[in-house]
Image (spheres, helix red, strand yellow):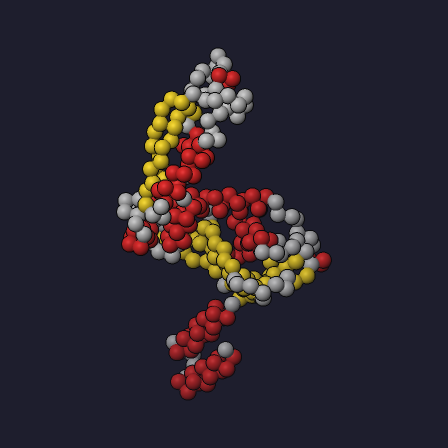
Amino acid sequence: MQAELISKQVQSWLSGQTHCRSCGAALNHKDSRSTVLRTVYGKVTVKSPRLWSCACQRTARTPPHVVHPLSKDLIRRVTPELEYLQAKWAAHLPYRQAAAMLKEVLPLHKGISSSGIRNRILDIGRQLDADIERDIAKLPQAVPDVQVREFSHIAAVSVDSAWLRNRDSGRGPGRHVNIVAGRATFTDGPPKLYAYVHGEVTSAVARLDQFLSRNGVASDERVTVISDDAGEFAKTVEGSQLARGRILDWFHIAMKFQAAQRSVFGSKMIESMGQESVETEITRAK
């Protein structure tokens, strides 16, 4: 069914490509090749005709050349359904496991590979990054703080950072990469996430503003960010125009109390009887 459906769709589309778009004359047929299209149900091979260019476009500098309409317009050679499944499962699993799972539940056979999924994810990542950069270029200038109000639809924005081992540490600038990730909790909808690799993007300072602006925060509104006290992330929050301030989250506050409790046991300045009293006071303060 999939092969028949795609063949009919290709034939219908090619019927409108056999004439010159400038003068309307019929293009001469040269030969036919085959093009492989990857679908959820495996590979489908379709005929792809090659045509000679129209005489109205031929000049001394542009001699007759071959026009390949299907290959020109069918760049990705994969259906949106398969691309969606690859992106979804590769976001949750390692590439090899995602490829093995898709092969097990779908009749893909040799139509999918871990390297192909990785390339697909990198391509999608570049597209998303380009969209973000376009949004950043269109960000309005924030108004002064004296004229702002708190954005009411976001209950909280929490942001954290982590260090991961660099896969290309032998060729890259360092052994680890710093990832910044944020989560916005809304009062009237599901939470949303954003993330990027700090140091790998030129617009790291504006990433938080782009995320907030895309989710409805205007230039005269502000949000409060909950985060830890990490130095590499402080640069990101302080560079934001839409983040009013930063609150240290409860987990890291609790860690400060734990460090204080541990220091009591190792202190030689406090007697054993006094240690219990000091520890009780720290617990009460916590």
Which residue is most to the right?
A: 147
Q: Is residue 253 above or below residue 64?
A: below
Q: Residue at x 38, y 50 (%)?
A: 86
Residue 169 appears at what percent x and percent y? 34, 47
Q: Residue furthest bottom?
A: 273
Q: Residue at x 43, y 72 (%)?
A: 259
Q: Is residue 92 above or below residue 118?
A: below
Q: Position of residue 104 (x, y in %)?
A: 28, 54
The residue at 59%/43% (across/down) is 137
Give the tally of numbered discs.
0
Whether residue 96 is visible, yes or no, is no
Nearer to us in this view, 8 or 159: 8
**In the displayed structure, does residue 252 sit left or right of residue 155?**
left
Q: Is residue 192 visible?
A: yes
Q: Nearer the viewer, residue 74 or 253?
A: 74
- Picture residue at 69% right of the left edge, 53% below the top: 143
> Where is residue 184 drawn, in percent x and y?
54, 61
Above or below residue 281? Residue 37 is: above
Considering depth in this image, is 282 or 15 the residue closer to the camera? 15
Measuring from the top left, give residue 200's x and y in whole percent. 46, 46
